[in-house]
Image (cartoon, rainbow, N blue to C red):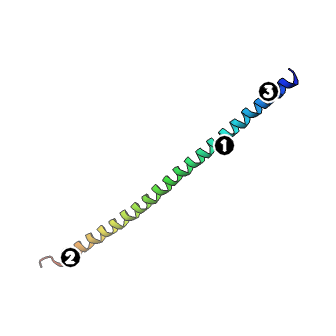
Amino acid sequence: MSEDEFTKLYRHTTKMVNDLRKDMEHGFEMMHAEFNRIYGLFDSANGEIKSLDYEQLMMKRQADRHERWIGELSEKTKPS
């Protein structure tokens, strides 16, 4: 292989490697952006679940309180 052929091969290989590196970097950037989007969705869903859990707890406490009040009223209003 002559020096000129080697130089052409080297340049071609170097260009291919650099193009591949750029494509991979772009792919990694796209994956990073997509992962950030997915993590954001999970964080949002987690926040909504926590809110719903808290709301459910408050509703249960309110129902328990109403049940207790109804029980107290029924005891107080029983015919003697």
Residue in the foreground of this view, choosing between 56 and 10: 10
Question: Up-down: is 34 above or below 53?
Answer: above
Amino acid at dot 2: Leu
Disc 1 or disc 2, which is closer to the eye? 1
| Residue at position x 66%, y 39% in the image | 24
- Dot placed on the residue nearer the N-terminal end, 2 or 3: 3
Label 1 sits on residue: 25
The 10 Å Cα crowd at callout 3, few under 14, some 14 to 19, many 20 or more, is: few
Label 2 sits on residue: 73
Residue 65: image location, x then y, percent: 30, 71
Label 3 sits on residue: 9
Q: Quadrant of the C terminus?
A: bottom left
Residue 1: image location, x then y, percent: 86, 20
- Cβ–Cβ below 8 Å for labels 2 and 3? no
Real-space Cα distance between discs 2 and 3? 95 Å
Amino acid at dot 3: Leu
Horizontally, residue 47 falls left or right of residue 35, namely left
| Residue at position x 83%, y 23% in the image | 5
Amino acid at dot 1: Glu
Real-space Cα distance between discs 3 and 1? 24 Å
Q: Which residue is the extreme one toward the top?
A: 1
Residue in the foreground of this view, choosing between 43 and 74: 43
Q: Which residue is the extreme one toward the front?
A: 4
Residue in the foreground of this view, choosing between 77 and 26: 26
- Dot placed on the residue nearer the N-terminal end, 3 or 1: 3
Q: Secondary structure at mark 2?
A: helix
